[in-house]
Amino acid sequence: MIRRNLTQLLALALLGLGTSLWAQSGDTATDVKGDRKDLRQDRRDLNKDGKDIRSDQRDLNKDRVDRNKDARDINKDQKDLTKDRRERNQDLKKGDTAAAAKEQKDINHDKRDLNRDRRDLRADNRDINKDKKDLHADRKDARKDKKDIRHDRRDIHRDKKGK
């Protein structure tokens, strides 16, 4: 009984070893062909990632310029608002209510403009952060594609040498 089980176990192990060797000794021509196809695809992906990186970098630069413009505009509007308030208060001291009303109209306009610029500044900062994340992801993907290219080239070399 023990001999029969031992014999069957040995036969099963031998069959398993034989099938694994047969599976590993597959056709190297198809392996090389598949690796070359992978290599071409990885190079295409790397090229697309490079285009994405450059595009995101341009977009990031435009957003930064826009953000700086909005910040300068906010400073200018605050100075105008301060000046208009000073002039309104002087007009009220003089008793010129018509000029004070005109200055108040300018103050209200400057407040609206200031709020619009602040909203634009927040939107630009959000765009900058989103673009930074996207740029990071594209760079990470490009590194992965470079690594895949290296592995595919190594696989092609090993398949040609028969290792």
Image (cartoon, rainbow, N blue to C red):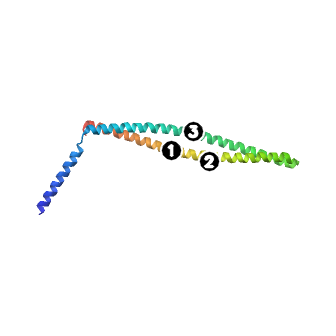
Q: State which tag comes first along the sequence, 3 or 2.
A: 3
Is residue 87 something one can see in this rendering?
A: no
Is residue 77 something one can see in this rendering?
A: yes
Q: Position of residue 6 (x, y in %)?
A: 14, 59
Q: State which tag comes first along the sequence, 2 or 1.
A: 2
Q: Quadrant of residue 152?
A: top left
Q: In this figure, which residue is indicated by the disc labeled 1?
A: 134
Residue drawn at (59%, 41%), measured in percent from left and top?
64
Helix, strand or loop under label 3: helix
Task: Assess whether mark 1 and mark 3 are in contact (beta carbons under 8 angstroms).
Answer: no
Residue drawn at (84%, 45%), measured in percent from left and top?
99
Of residue 73 and residue 26, the one placed in the foreground of this image is: 26
Helix, strand or loop under label 1: helix
Q: Quadrant of residue 3?
A: bottom left
Which quadrant does the N terminus fall into?
Answer: bottom left
Mark 3 to mark 1 CA distance (whole Å): 14 Å
Q: Amino acid at mark 1?
A: Asp
Tag shown at residue 122: 2
Of residue 1 and residue 157, the one placed in the foreground of this image is: 1
Q: Amino acid at mark 3?
A: Asn
Q: Is residue 18 left or right of residue 134?
A: left
Mark 2 to mark 1 CA distance (whole Å): 18 Å
Q: In this figure, which residue is indicated by the disc labeled 3?
A: 61
